[in-house]
Image (cartoon, helix red, strand yellow):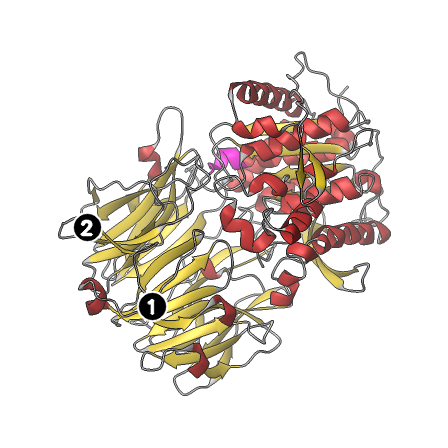
Amino acid sequence: MPRLSRRALLAAGTALALAGTARAARPYVTPRPITVANQPLPFPSRPFTETLWGQHVSDPYRWMEAEDAQWRACTASQAAYAEAVLSHIPGRDSLAAAIAENSNALTLVAGLQTGGRLIFTERRPPEAQTTRLYVRDGQNGADRLLLDPMRFSTQSSHAALDWWQASPAGTHLVFGISQGGSEHSVLRLMEVESGQIAPLALTRTDDANPSWLPDGSGFFYTRNQDVPIEDPRYEENSSAWLHLLNGGEDRRLLGPGLSAGIALTPIDSPTLIATPGSDLIIAQINEGVRNEIALYLTRLPALLAGRPDWHPICTQADQVTDFAVRGDEIFLLTHKHASHYRVVKLTAAAPHFADAQEMVPTGRPVIRAIMAAKNGLYLIDRDAGLAGLRHLGDDGKLTALALPFPGALDPDLAFSIPSQEGLWFPLEGWLRPCVFCHAGADGQITETCLAPQPDIDVSAYTTETLLAPARDGVRVPLSLLYRKGLARDGSATLLMEAYGAYGIALEPAFMGRWLPFLDQGAVFAVAHVRGGGELGEDWHLAGMKAEKYHSWQDAEDCALHLIDQGYCGHRTLGVVGGSAGGITVGRLLTERPELAAVAISMVGVSDPLRAEFSPNGPPNIPEFGSVKTERGFHDLFAMDAYQHVHDGVDYPAVLLTTGLHDPRVSPWEATKMAARLQAASASKNPILLRVEDDGGHGFGATRAQRDAETADIMAFTLWRTGHPGFQPG
C-alpha cells in the first residue's frame, strides 16, 4: 500500500526470435486440470454479521484477522497445495531457468549519494541475492564493499538493507536493516573508513528518514512509538529524534504533545530535515500516506538549545508535495490551482506560503520533484509518459535538458546537494536497462559507469502506446510490450497490469524478467488507470475515495479495448495488480468475472473495509477513507472485493499472493479473499493462495524469491489462458 515500489524488473537474456515476421495464430487448448495428491485444508466459515451505518455486513471469515493457530495451519496447507500445483505446470521450470538467467545478467542500482569526494551506491551485483552498499573515491575510483546486509541474516530469515544515509563529508553512515521482508528496520551506525559498526541498534525505525546535521556531528531520525509491531497503533504517534556522535542520550525533539505551534494527529509522521550549507531546519509533517505535506521552519542553534521557534511555511491545504532548501531560499512544489504542478519560492525572512513568488508556472509537463544544487534548481518532469529534466538558473532562466534516450527517471533515486553542482539521476525504458547519468553545470548530460550495462540484444521486441476509450469518454493510456510480428487475431496470451492509487504512476521499467513471457508469443500490458499520477493530480483524484470506481472500470475498459483491437481474447486475457492494485483487480474480478481468464492479486488489498484495523491501516485513511464515517464506509464498501464475492458465480482462475511478514497489507486480507472465493465459486477454475514464509510486501526480497514468484505468475497465466505448451498430460 503506502510506499509501494515499482516492480523490480531486471535485465534480459539474448532475444532469439526473428523480428518483423507475423506469426500464425497459436492454437487455444482448453486448460486441463492439475491433480496433486493432497488437497488443502479449507478455511472454516464462521457466520458473522454487523450493521454499519444502517447496512448489514456479512463477514464469515472475520476470525482470520486474529491470525491464530488454526489460521496458520490452514494457510500453511493452502500454501503447500499452491506450490504443488504451480510446480506441476509443464514449462514452468524452463521459464524459471530463463528468468533466473536474465535477472542475473544485470547489476541493479538501487541508490546513489555523494559524501565529500566519495560516491556511495546501493547495488545488487549478479552474484548477490540482495542489494549491497559500495563506496568509491570519485566517479572513476575502485568500488569497495562497505556493507552486505546478509551478514545480519539468521538461519530462518534473510536480512535486507531498507534505507541508508551518508554524512555530508562521507565519514559516517546510518542505515536500517530488517529481517524477512518485514521492513521493521533496526537503525545502525558505521564509520566509513574502517567499516566498523557501532553498538547502536535502535528498533522501531521503519521509516527513519535520517538527516545529518550540516557538520556531520549527528543526525535526526524518526521512530515509531513503543508498542508491539502487531498493535494497530504501531504506526501512530511517531516522533523525531536527534542522535549525536559524541555520546549522550538521544533527544526527542518533535512529537505528540511536545512542540508548541505544531499540532499533530495520531497518523502524522514528523521528520526533521537539515541541509548542507544552511542552518535552516525544516519540520515536515506527513499525514499518513497523503502526498500533501505541512512544513515548519526554525534555526539549528535554537533547536539544539531546546528553544525552537517554529514558523509555519505551509499546511496540507496549500497542496505542497515537495520542497528544496538552498541557503535561506526555500522552493516549494505545489498543485494548488495547478494539476500539473508549479514551483514557488520564498525565503527564511518571509517563510509563509502566501508570500511565495511563482518561479515556474504550470504547463504541459507534470512536475514530479524539485532538487537543489549549487548551480540552481532541477525539475524532474513527466510528459506523455516519459521523463523530462529542466534546470532553473539563478537568473530565472528555465532550460530543458536533452536526455540520452526516452525513458523514466525515478526522483527517489536522483541525488543533488546545494554544496555541489549538478544532478545524479537514473534513466531506463521498457527495453533499455537503467543507466546512471550526471547533469553538469554546463547543461551537458553524461552517462556514467555506475550502472554496468550488459550485452543484451532486445531488437526482437517492441513497445506501443494506445489510448483506450473509457465508458465516460476519458482516454486511458495503455503501454504494450511484445515480440515484433505479433498477429493481432485475438489468440495471444495477454497479461495486463493495473494499479491506480496514491498518485503513483506505472512508468517504464526495464522488463528483463518478463522477456521469457514475451518469447512465448505473449503480450504484457500496463493500464495507466485513474488513481495514479500519470496525468497529474486530477488523474489521482479521479480514482480516490468516492471516485475509486474509475480505477477498476478503467481497467475493464482497457481490457475490452485490447480484446477489440485483437491483442487477445477473453479466454487469453489475464489481469494482475499488486498492493493497492489489488483493489483494482479484485473489483474487476467481482464486477466482471467473465471478462478475463486469469486474475492475480499480488500482496493485494482485498478487504479495505477492514484494513483500517491493521497496523498500516490508519495511515491509509487519507487515500481511501474511514469506516468510522458514513461517507467513508460507503466508499470503502464499494471498493471492497471480498464483500462483492457472491455464491454460485463462475469465477476465473485466481492466484493470490502474500508474505507472512508483510507490514503494509496484512496477510489475512489475501487469506480471507482466497477462502471466500473458494467457497463461492461455481466454476472448476483453481483459486490458489501463494505464501512466502520468509517474505513481506516484496521490499527486501531476494533475487531468487522474485525469480520464483515471476515464474509462478507467468506459468499460471499461460496455463489458464490455454497456451498449449503449458498444459499437463
Q: Is residue 382 left or right of residue 583?
A: left
Residue 362 visible at all: yes
Q: Is residue 48 left or right of residue 345?
A: right
Q: Of helix, strand and loop, which one carries label 1?
A: loop
Q: Is residue 324 above or below residue 395?
A: above
Q: Is residue 58 above or below residue 561?
A: above
Q: Which mark is residue 193?
A: 2
Q: Residue furthest front?
A: 54
Q: Residue at x 43, y 55 (%)?
A: 265
Q: Is residue 725 left or right of residue 702?
A: right
Q: Main secondary structure of the magenta part?
A: helix
Q: Nearer the viewer, mark 2 or mark 1?
A: 1
Q: Amino acid at mark 2?
A: Glu
Q: Amino acid at mark 1?
A: Ile
Q: Which mark is residue 2?
A: none
Residue 171 placed where, x, y %? 21, 55
Q: Residue at x 76, y 40 (%)?
A: 590
Image quarter hosting the C terminus = top right
Q: Residue at x 72, y 56 (%)?
A: 550
Q: Which is nearer the eye, 232 or 486? A: 232
Q: Residue furthest top?
A: 37
Residue 447 placed where, x, y %? 45, 64
Q: Is residue 395 above or below residue 703?
A: below
Residue 692 placed where, x, y %? 53, 30
Q: Which is nearer the eye, 496 or 146? A: 496
> In the rendered structure, which disc, 2 or 1, sits on the residue that comes first in sequence?
2
Q: Residues within 10 Å of mark 1 (few under 14, many from 20)?
A: many
Q: Is residue 294 magenta?
A: no
**Magenta part of the protein: which range?**
701-706
Q: Given contact means CB atoms under 8 Å apart, are the residues at marks 2 and 1 in contact?
A: no
Q: Which is nearer the eye, 421 or 473? A: 473
**Disc 1 marks which residue?**
417
